[in-house]
Amino acid sequence: MNIDAIEAAAGRLSGRARRTPMLSSPFLDEIAGRRVLVKAECLQHTGSFKYRGGWSAVSALPDDTKGVIAFSSGNHAQGVALAARQRGLPAVIVMPTDAPALKRANTAAYGAEVILYDRATEDRDAIGERLAAERGLALIRPFDDANVIAGQGTCGLEIAKQAAELGVTDGTVLTCCGGGGLTSGIALALEARAPGLRVRPVEPEDSDDVRRSLEAGEILRNAVQSRSICDAIVTPSAGKLTFPILKRLCGPGLVVSDEDCLKAMALAFLRLKVVIEPGGAAALAAALFHGEALEDGAVVCTASGGNVDPAVFRRALDSLAA
Amino acid sequence: MNIDAIEAAAGRLSGRARRTPMLSSPFLDEIAGRRVLVKAECLQHTGSFKYRGGWSAVSALPDDTKGVIAFSSGNHAQGVALAARQRGLPAVIVMPTDAPALKRANTAAYGAEVILYDRATEDRDAIGERLAAERGLALIRPFDDANVIAGQGTCGLEIAKQAAELGVTDGTVLTCCGGGGLTSGIALALEARAPGLRVRPVEPEDSDDVRRSLEAGEILRNAVQSRSICDAIVTPSAGKLTFPILKRLCGPGLVVSDEDCLKAMALAFLRLKVVIEPGGAAALAAALFHGEALEDGAVVCTASGGNVDPAVFRRALDSLAA
């Protein structure tokens, strides 16, 4: 995997993916004690960066593809469902029973067949691979797929350009990190286009496999089922394709609490006027509330998704009064 | 006033104002029964398009200017306060006592001196002009100022370009309309750059002076003090500079209820991932819920601001359950 694959994905995504804005607020800079730029991928089609990888992968499938299948807590689901519809292919999406209602409803609304599984007792990889084989569908993995990583990397191309336009060529890029598709894609793009920007993954406290894996130098899994509200970035472990990239280019990792994420969502509402979901707020939460763990200098945060149920958003607004 | 003034303002705003994104969602298109594009000016600096006019006017002041004064329910206030700070000038902002708390706090946080007045019993124009004379400050009117109109018109330049990129060169542009600064600026820009797009102002039901004025062919005032939650677009009447432009290029006007605006805010939260304030949701509300009053074809809505207090945003979220 290298920058050429990302540039090729950028070509396929041209005229399809949105170039999402890089936002900022003097009020957030004051809280963080440093310059904070927010790459608002919540404004991407389907409400998260996952459309980039979805279309990157679906558009690269051979012409005789019968359909696609994906497993996802909901953002990859929507990205693949929309991409499949745009390509005129049927899509089957395997989702956990506890996925946010909005994500399930949207995935179905994009025309996909949704199949539910129990995160605690069933293995989504096994279900996905079995259904792919049975029905002859192309499996689009959520992060361990070269075309998906390349698609997410197009977000990194934009970060490099937009940060430079704002005078930021050195500093830290914080990513909301699950299996490492976005993180590794951005890191590859920045290695080539903005080598002064270093990527550090941010995870929920009880789902910090990537932080621990980077320390150990090998892929570790999360021992327990995460109870975090950050569903978008709760993943058993990094992938065989993503981890070597993370190990070479990223880290050290950071962790944030659910409360940190709710507060960051509230500040994004108040100061940036964007809606971020808990898992999409992890990077901003680290920038705002864990600055002591960062080197000096500007920080770019990916606000990676905005698919949040109203009840959870209310909890975020509650944190403003507290 | 013509396109040259708007192009000149665009030059002054280059590198300062954000080129805000044009958003859309298949779910909104389905509700509206037509293609809906949303110009997300809530993502502009200070959370509304008013920064455009603010910097356009402040940057055009002579070098010996001692300071600026403005009156505003809060968005013009913030736009002028930030622009004055960027130019290194003191700012006095006259705001109504019932302005949203967030808008008052932000205006002060941008460094302005905030002076409150009672909307029911005091005349903000008179207060502004008196203070301007007493303190030797340059008065920046919220809409009846050529440089302000030209600044807001830069939003129209972007609409023309972004709509064309999305294949929309014919259709309706709905604006959230108070005194007509944004509406007239956009209309002038589109007259020159996208003549197939016609501007129609949208107002709250009990503050529809522009709709009635366009029908009558002369400036009418609102007889009663509006009770609408759309504070950003509740204005006594259009201006001497804005109305002739509105009369020549815009209309007929539309009206929306507060409930329409709350529902549009909720759908923007759910489908676009942006935070819109009530007055900034009027245009989207008209597109979604009053399509029968529109000609066939695509519609572009300005989402003109996002400075909403959390309590009002909760009311919007409540409308999703209803």
Image (cartoon, coloured by chain):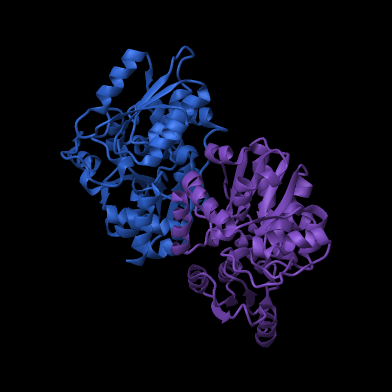
Chain colours: A blue, B purple
**Quarter of the N terminus of chain A within the rendering:** top left
The residue drawn where x is 66% and y is 78% is B124
> Is residue B293 among what the camera can see?
yes
In the displayed image of the protein, which residue is found farthest to the left?
A: A223
The residue drawn where x is 37% and y is 36% is A74
- Provide residue B146's location: percent of width, then percent of height: 75, 65
In the displayed image of the protein, which residue is found farthest to the bottom?
A: B134
The residue drawn where x is 51% and y is 21% is A88
Relative to A96, say whether B177 is above or below: below
- Provide residue B138's location: percent of width, then percent of height: 68, 77
- Provide residue A156's location: percent of width, then percent of height: 44, 40
**Towards the viewer: A296 or A45:** A45
- Provide residue A268's location: percent of width, then percent of height: 43, 56
**Towards the viewer: B262 or A268:** B262
In the displayed image of the protein, which residue is found farthest to the front?
A: B322
Left or right: B160, with A120 as reference point: right
